[in-house]
């Protein structure tokens, strides 16, 4: 197993308010897009499916789910050391990405209201869910005497511009990978209740159904836009997005190995399973998926993680900027070449089997 990294002590913005983690390529991002172009999307090619998903979202099955019951009412000071630090880090990362979803969906809903009411409704319901998720996680952080100042985060984070096509690919994948991440933790804790050191994990079963529905909405939206799946360009983009999401996931799981070990999860097995399941699920939306059974697939993903570990060591060393710069070249080159080799593995066509994979 790879060496678990120690989680650093949380930095504070003011007492009890945690400073957001430094933004890197791997921290959850905040997105903005061309709202006008989304409002003008012609969804008629798949309107019935979209309407059905919006009805599901409207039903709000989880409206009574996010309640902090009795179990939360106690002190959590007995959760200490690396387990506590790693758990706070997990809560923060999850809270930030839920909140980032909330901001994007809320803005989309606001800007689409007049021109595309069906999509505006969908984004409004999804913003509702993400606000609940982020709020619940932030309250959990408060149980550990910390919280995130979400309005500070709204103002001070940099927003990455993604054109609507990229938003659809990236958010679809992040919802589906989110589903698999939560459900696999939930199933593991159900089978091994001795690892349930905090009641949050109990909430994951219904919680992940929200992410699943969000993913289904993005799948319906993607299939309503033939240019996002019926040509060679879209095939190249899909490979790129699948690969970058899987590389990022591998790095973040291995970096936080101590958290997974604290709840009895084997980081490598968990990472592989989340990726395999997300990849298989994606065949319902994408024209192709990656070949996760290729003998080099997971090995190369892990090589990317090992190179990022080397980069972190160099960054944190006391060497001069000049030396650091040149030392970074080999691990950077290794990440690029491993990603390129992964990208070139022959993908699996999903269009030809579409009728059978539903
Ligand atoms: Fe969520
Ligand atoms: Fe979601």
Image (spheres, rainbow, N blue to C red):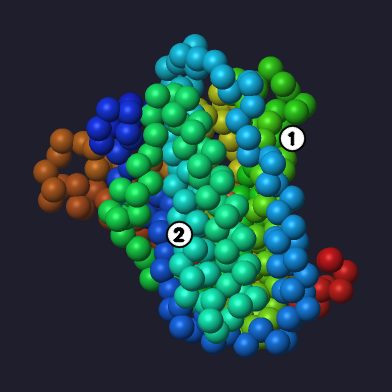
Query: x, y (%) of residue 138?
Result: 47, 37
**Residue at the location (57% across, 55% down)?**
128
Q: Nearer the viewer, mark 1 or mark 2?
A: 2
**Residue at the location (75% across, 66% down)?**
55
- The answer for how far apart the CA atoms under marks 1 and 2 are is 30 Å
Q: Which residue is mark 1?
A: 187
Q: Is residue 103 visible?
A: yes
Camera-nearest residue between 297 and 173: 173
Q: Quadrant of residue 172?
A: bottom right
Camera-nearest residue between 205 and 253: 205
Report the residue that reaches farthest toward the top.
78
Q: Quadrant of residue 220?
A: bottom right
Q: Is residue 219 above or below residue 352?
A: above
Camera-nearest residue between 315 and 101: 101
Contact flag, marks 1 and 2 (Cβ < 8 Å): no
Question: In which quadrant of the rendered image does the N terminus lie?
Answer: top right
Q: Quadrant of residue 310?
A: top left
Instruction: Point out which mark residue 103 bears.
Output: 2
Query: x, y (%) of residue 224?
Result: 68, 81
Q: In terms of secondary structure, where does tag 2 sit? A: helix
């Amino acid at each position: 197993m790879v060496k678990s990294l120690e989680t650093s002590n949380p930095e504070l913005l003011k007492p009890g308010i945690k400073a957001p983690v430094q933004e890197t390529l791997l921290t959850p991002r905040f997105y903005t897009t061309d709202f006008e172009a989304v409002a003008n999307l012609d969804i008629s090619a798949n309107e019935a499916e979209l309407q059905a998903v919006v009805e599901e979202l409207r039903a709000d099955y989880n409206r009574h789910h996010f309640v902090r019951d009795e179990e939360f009412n106690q002190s959590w000071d007995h959760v200490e050391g690396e387990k506590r630090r790693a758990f706070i880090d997990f809560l923060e990362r999850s809270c930030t990405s839920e909140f980032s979803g909330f901001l994007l969906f809320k803005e989309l809903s606001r800007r689409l209201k007049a021109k595309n009411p069906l999509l505006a409704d969908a984004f409004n319901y999804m913003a509702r869910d993400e606000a609940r998720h982020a709020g619940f996680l932030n309250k959990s952080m408060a149980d550990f005497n910390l919280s995130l100042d979400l309005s500070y985060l709204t103002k001070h984070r940099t927003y990455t511009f993604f054109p609507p096509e990229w938003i659809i690919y990236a958010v679809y994948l992040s919802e589906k990978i989110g589903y698999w991440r939560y459900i696999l933790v939930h199933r593991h804790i159900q089978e091994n209740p001795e690892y349930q050191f905090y009641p949050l994990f109990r909430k994951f079963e219904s919680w992940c159904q929200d992410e699943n529905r969000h993913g289904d909405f993005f799948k319906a939206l993607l299939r309503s836009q033939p240019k996002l799946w019926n040509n060679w360009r879209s095939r190249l983009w899909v490979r790129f997005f699948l690969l970058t999401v899987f590389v990022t996931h591998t790095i973040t799981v291995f970096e936080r190995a101590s958290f997974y070990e604290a709840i009895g999860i084997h980081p490598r097995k968990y990472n592989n399973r989340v990726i395999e399941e997300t990849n298989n699920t994606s065949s319902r939306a994408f024209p192709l998926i990656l070949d996760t059974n290729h003998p080099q697939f997971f090995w190369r993903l892990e090589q990317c993680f090992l190179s990022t570990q080397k980069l972190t060591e160099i960054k944190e060393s006391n060497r001069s900027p000049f030396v650091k710069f040149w030392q970074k070249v080999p691990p950077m080159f290794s990440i690029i070449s491993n990603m390129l080799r992964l990208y070139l593995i022959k993908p699996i066509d999903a269009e030809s089997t579409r009728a059978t994979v539903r």
